[in-house]
Amino acid sequence: MPKKPMNTDKITALYCRLSRDDGGDAESNSIGNQKTILSRYSAEHGFSNTKFYVDDGWSGANFQRPGFEAMMSDVDNGLIGTIICKDMSRFGRDYLHVGLYTEIKFPEAGIRFIAINDGVDSASGVSDDFTPFRNIINEWYCRDISKKIKASMQSRAKSGEHLTGNPPYGYKKSETDPKKWVIDEEPAAIIREIFALYLNGKNATQISEEMARRGYDAPGDYLAKQKQYTKGKAVTFETPKALWHPGTILNLLDRYEYCGHTVSYRRKTVSYKTHKSVLNDESDWIITKNTQDAIIDEETWQTVHKMRESGRRRKENVWDKGPLNGFLYCPDCGSKLYFNHPSRLKTSGTYMCGYYMHYKKCTTHYIRRDELEPAVLAQLRADCAFAREHETEFVAMVEKKTRQQGDDTVKKGEKEYAEAKARIEEIDLIINQLYEDKVSGNLSAERFSRMLTKYEEEQATLRAKCESLQVQITAARTTSDNAKQFIKMVRKFTEMQELTPEIVSTLIERVEVGQAQVVDGVKKQEIKIIYNFIGNIQE
């Protein structure tokens, strides 16, 4: 005999939910099918004053759904007496939240809860010991689906597929294949101008002012007018014109897509239970090379990127610290050498070890700028001339020098990689045991949640480490490629009359300045250049 309805003067909430998580069960769980089942059940069991609350296209791991929130608002206002859903998975797939509602909130509010297919009815007065376990299974399902979706997205990203619907400023969708990006020549020409101005010493503010002076549309205006924003606002004569901003310039300078590559996973979701996202560490980005035509060549972008990181751009009304500023290091303590302006010195400025300047814990490593720059330029010109004129011999020399170092790096990296992978697999087993302990009652929900978060964070760190190690191992195995890449960059500068920010950023990784020594009355000071890609070739 069916139970007598409770609170017949209040609303009987009929809750339906469907999402892509449901996979092959989507047809049986369709909103229409759920409504039919719930209507029939409520009619057969004497429930009246029914009202549907529907969430179509919402994950069960997310409880910030419009239909669910509307239902809970009516619960808080005392309007609902009974909640009926097809099964527990329709209500939600996060067992902690499901338990909070069904075991605490609804009983306290005097609300009867029914999950038809699972045989759950809070009015029966009989505790269903299997319900918590069923909720955990529902969450496992959602967790597994989330992992599969993430793996699929990562696979698509690694294959070079664009995961974003809108191409960045400078590209547009191909007319023959919307999944492909092709160069949009008008903004692409502006991007090239921006990079050229930056290389010539202009800062972001100066470049943004120059773009506005030339009358160029800011990226937002241009893309909206071209209707490249799938969700963008329509541009009208009343729409305020967007302004070029220094931040816009910096964003364009940082876009690696302009080298012809695809960059994915700049952001990540905090958890599969929420849509909140945060910036991803740059080491976790997925970069697929050569997926579209390049607007900016690789060497130019890398040079600008190094200039951006070092913050060594010349500014008006500020002391010129020289093109080597930010690249000078003490070989003894590892500190940077800092510039001293020439206000009371009859020199163009000097550099000194930062650790000595602040703590007096090292030696000065003092050197005058007008002595340092000619010495670096002379060595740079000699090394580059040798690399250009004796390419085969230069490549062989670099390979011989770096082979042993590369072999050591590979061995160490492979060992660390194996240890990290083993720990990741070990944590998987620990997490499975945690679920079993939680289900059996040997572990509280609070402690389970805390321990699960801890192990998941450790796994995420280890996975990031594995990806970083793979990059290091691959790099250590490509010494000849590095030498050829260095020669390619050298060919950009056929004559070097003076050091410039572009030359330094393109060719040099760092310069180590030793402590000056006086030998037989002669001052001697070692200056060691460590080049990009190939390191120090003088040792």
Image: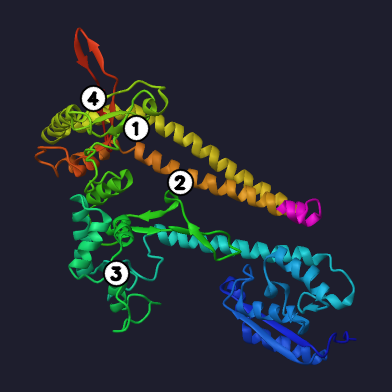
Residue 406 appears left or right of 466: left
User: Disc 4 on helix, strand or loop?
Assistant: loop
User: Disc 3 on helix, strand or loop?
Assistant: loop
In this rendering, the answer to whether 515 lies above or below 301 is above
Quadrant, the C terminus:
top left
As measured in the structure, the alpha-carbon distance from the residue carrying label 3 to the one carrying label 1 is 38 Å
- Whether residues under marks 1 and 2 lie with C-beta atoms below 8 angstroms apart, the answer is no
As measured in the structure, the alpha-carbon distance from the residue carrying label 2 to the one carrying label 3 is 40 Å
**Which residues, given as a range, are shown in magenta?**
437-448
246 falls in the magenta region: no
- The residue furthest front is 344
Numbered disc in front, either 4 or 1: 1
User: Disc 1 on helix, strand or loop?
Assistant: loop
- Whether residues under marks 3 and 1 lie with C-beta atoms below 8 angstroms apart, the answer is no
Does the rendering let one see residue 242?
Answer: yes
Q: Return the residue at label 1.
A: 336
Say which amino acid is labelled 4.
Gln
As measured in the structure, the alpha-carbon distance from the residue carrying label 4 to the one carrying label 1 is 22 Å
User: Disc 2 on helix, strand or loop?
Assistant: helix
Q: Return the residue at label 4.
A: 538
As measured in the structure, the alpha-carbon distance from the residue carrying label 2 to the one carrying label 4 is 32 Å
Q: Residues within 10 Å of mark 4 (few under 14, many from 20)?
A: few
Numbered disc in front, either 2 or 4: 4
